[in-house]
Amino acid sequence: MINVHITDDHAMVVELLILVINASENACVTGSSLKLSECRKALTLNCPDVLLLDIDMTDGDGIVFCDEMRKLYPQLRIIGLTSHDEYPCVILLMLKNGASGYITKSGAVCEVLEAIDAVMRGEIYISQKMEQIIRKTTKPEISLTPREKAVLQMMSKGMNNPQIAEQLEVALSTVVSFRKKQNLKPKESNLVELVANARKEGLIE
């Protein structure tokens, strides 16, 4: 039986996933967390085979957390959960930080079980829709305002949206708007490359 831990700050999502997974024949939910801090503590007590991880948590950045947990628990398979199925940079960052899979909350319920089975076989699971989005990602071209450079600098350090908004003393919606703009522009949709090129050009440290 595959042991699964769910970390998502939406209780209804957690409850639904528990029902779906526990109804399967080869996986069961051994724990759940509504915060990254709770998940971190839970994994020290009982590390599962698979972690379903919401990447946009209220108490931290799930992408950075993914990298941290993979380093602490090399055998742990992490599947990213997100509502942002149109953002290629999110997928790439999750994979770069050690995720074994990536699924959207808007996808079919059966996709969760398919992803769990796939990662346990040692495969990387990304839906066909996600693969098509990644293929559309083109080489980034740097074109940033001073404020955007500051936001990108903080993003490269793993800061989440609320932390960036507090640091810059701007509305959270301003930071969210910038991140969406970066994600939706084809020429700047690959955040990994965007950060790398920005550093190469000396735009950020």
Image (spheres, rainbow, N blue to C red):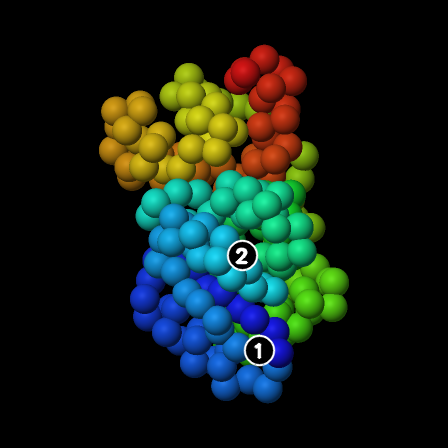
**For residue 133, which quarter of the picture?**
bottom right
Circles 2, 1 touching at the beta carbon (< 8 Å): no
Between 172 and 5, the one lying in front of the other is: 5
Residue 14's spot in the image, x, y percent? 39, 69
What residue sits 31% from the left and 31% below the top?
A: 165
Q: How crowded is mark 2: few (under 14 residues within 10 Å), some or many (20 or more)?
A: many
Residue 80: image tag: 2
What residue sits 61% from the left and 51% below the top?
A: 73
Between 131 and 163, the one lying in front of the other is: 163
Residue extending farthest to the right is 122
User: Can you say whether 114 is above or below 180 in the image?
Assistant: below
Residue 87's spot in the image, x, y percent? 52, 49
Residue 129's spot in the image, x, y percent? 61, 63
What residue sits 58% from the left and 22% below the top?
A: 198
Secondary element at image label 2: strand
Q: Marks 2/1: CA distance?
A: 17 Å
Q: Residues within 10 Å of mark 1 (few under 14, many from 20)?
A: some
Residue 31's spot in the image, x, y percent? 44, 67
Pointer 1 residue: 27
* Residue 41 seen: yes
Residue extending farthest to the top is 202
Between 61 and 171, the one lying in front of the other is: 61
* Residue 141 seen: no
- The amino acid type, in three-letter code, at marker 2 is Gly
Instruction: Tell which circle, 2 or 1, labels the residue nearer the N-terminal end.
Output: 1
What residue sits 35% from the left and 30% below the top?
A: 164
- The amino acid type, in three-letter code, at marker 1 is Ala
Residue 94: image tag: none
